[in-house]
Image: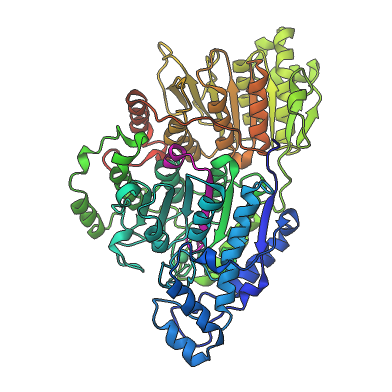
Amino acid sequence: VAMASGTALIYDEKMATHKLLWSDPICDIEVPERLSSSYEQLKSYHLVERCVPVPAREGSEEEILLVHSLEHLEVAKSTQTMNEEELKRVSENYDAFFFHPSTYHCARLAVGATLQLVDAVMSGEVRNGMALVRPPGHHSQRNAANGFCLFNNVAIAAEYAKLKYGLQRILIVDWDVHHGQGIQYIFEEDPSVLYFSWHRYEHQEFWPSLKESDYDAVGLGKGKGFNINLPWNKVGMGNSDYLAAFFHVLLPMAFEFDPELVIVSSGYDSGIGDPEGQMNATPEVFAHLTHFLMQLANGKLCVILEGGYHLKSLGESVCMTVKTLLGDPVPQITGEMAPCLSAVESIQNVRAAHKPYWKWLAYEDTSFLQNLSTKSHLLKKANSNTSTEHETKITNNNNTVKVERFLELHMKNILFPVPPIKTATIGSEGSEHFLSEHVQLVKEMDKTEIKSLVSGFYADLVEEDKILLSLGSMLAILDKILKKEVCNGIAASPTAALSAAVALRHSVRFGFQRVLCVFVGDMQITPNTEDGKMLIINICEKEQPGKTSCKHCISLNWKEDAEGNDFFSAVLGFILPVAYSYQPNLTVIAVGPNRSLGISGISLLVALLQGLAESRIVAVIEDTEISLLQSVAKALGGASTPPFGIYVPPTQEKVKKIKALRDQFQQEWKMLQCSVKDGI
Ligand code: X5A
Ligand code: ZN
């Protein structure tokens, strides 16, 4: 079966007719321009023309009744013919909602657009997609409109997908800055829908100010463990807080859950400049969040617009999301990478609350958390101004002009449009198995050229012809990446450790300040990493005698489980946090002899490491196994998400190992922090 390709985009300008007819300072931010200006922004970056246009349709009454009461549907329907006064009166029955004569029609289009996207993705017509809809949905409940939402688009989509496609596991990720309490209520007792929401909470002071938005609401009955709330108790959360939440809470749960479909309640009021959220995350963080979610459910990802009230910020963030869905390189995140204390505290709390329900958390040490609520209270009072407390505060949220200016400058630094991902390779035996339109054949470098390149730092090698030649393909490919002709490349090499070492030295000499090397297997040569311009993570089966890990040369002893893939816990709990803390300009991934990871583990690594270094990555592979080369090439192309097989939670021994490494390195690599007990 051919892998699904393409990104659907659903937009219907009719949904811009729903608007507020009277003055209401709470509702007046939910304007039609949210939709039209996002679409214009997509056009200006030439993203619309790269997507597959899918028409919206009206959701049927039957579909709406999958989630809502007949009474609710009838009330909504009755507003079509009302005058302004009547509309205002009905609207007052709800917390933060306004009706317009076109509201009912728009809300049905919003439901239908969402279902159209689910159909396009589930049928394989496209790989993924985004629906720009209004009114939003995640606050609406069985019998009530709420928080600008009339029908719960995403909840209806999940019920629809269960019914129509027989799905048994759906993940809903709600990155809107508000708690989608409507979704929580609908699936509270349902173990087939895993709902994750982070939200501005401020110890219940922020709207909707519900007790059940806190981290201890884990679901009810059979649904226990399938509702994940991550409350933000301070404003100003930024890129590193969001990424830490993904590494240490959402993603490990999502991989263990192994969804068949991922739906995003995609509110961008969690982005910088938003008057509701007051957060600091920049548009490109949404590229990273999207990229992570694309690794689940075989890439089946439906992104549905919810909130987002700063038009410029909203538009840029929507573009980042769609660009990433299309498979473009992921832009680099800038600024110091360290979650703030309040974020780490929230992360720790939700991990502790979910410990009984997730195997991956089973061995977490939470004994120190007896007085969670007291502690939470104390932390609220204290002005916890530690070194990690928003050191990189980007801008003052109250200053609209500043935010506008920031976004303008900021987005200029991100290449638009970026060339699509191209993979370079040498036309050697084996490569014919993964040639496709995004693979570019490169000529091997000749001996004299290699000699002149290598002699600067490995003079003794220049004498040996055989060794020199083995470097030829890697150097030719690396060169293409450095010249930005391609984004990544794959080279077979009989001497992976040497090739990796030369790749590192060459890119540092080229001018890169930070190069990350993830080496799988036995590494016979270890380059000098003292200047901090290289960071090596060596994944090998056995502890190397005499070798101790240091800040820039870390040894991770890991043998993948034979029964399935348990490596995700090490990637998310250690490798990615370290890598994101380091922020490399280039990633080298090398596979040497005695690799302790299977093909699926290595592919996962390659897929996830593409979030770094603007997706610049060179893979050097000593193993001649065709299926390994194929899988890595596929992961590099981003054209398809490799099938990862069964996810197995790690053993107690492995969890301890990761925990020990985290404790050892969290002062240096701050994205490792997920508990306030130690270190901070
Ligand atoms: C969809 C959404 C926010 C409602 C805020 C009411 N709703 N104060 O972002
Ligand atoms: Zn919102």
Residue 259 shown in magenta: yes
What x and y, as percent, mark residue 249?
39, 44
- Note whether 422 is above or below 550 in the view shown: below
x then y, percent, for residue 122 = 61, 48
Decide which of 667, 43 is in the foreground and name it. 43
- Residue 244 appears left or right of 466: left
Q: Residue at x 32, y 41 (%)?
A: 357
Residue 337 in sight:
yes
Q: Is residue 242 magenta?
A: no
Quadrant holding the N terminus: top right
Q: Is residue 611 at all visible to an observer of this figure?
A: no
Residue at 69% across, 27% down: 490
* Residue 471, above or below 272: above
Q: Residue at x 53, y 46 (%)?
A: 166
Residue 314: x %, y % from top left: 57, 64
Q: Position of residue 518 (x, y in %)?
A: 54, 27
Give whichever of 626, 152 is nearer the camera.
Answer: 152
Magenta residues (range): 252-272
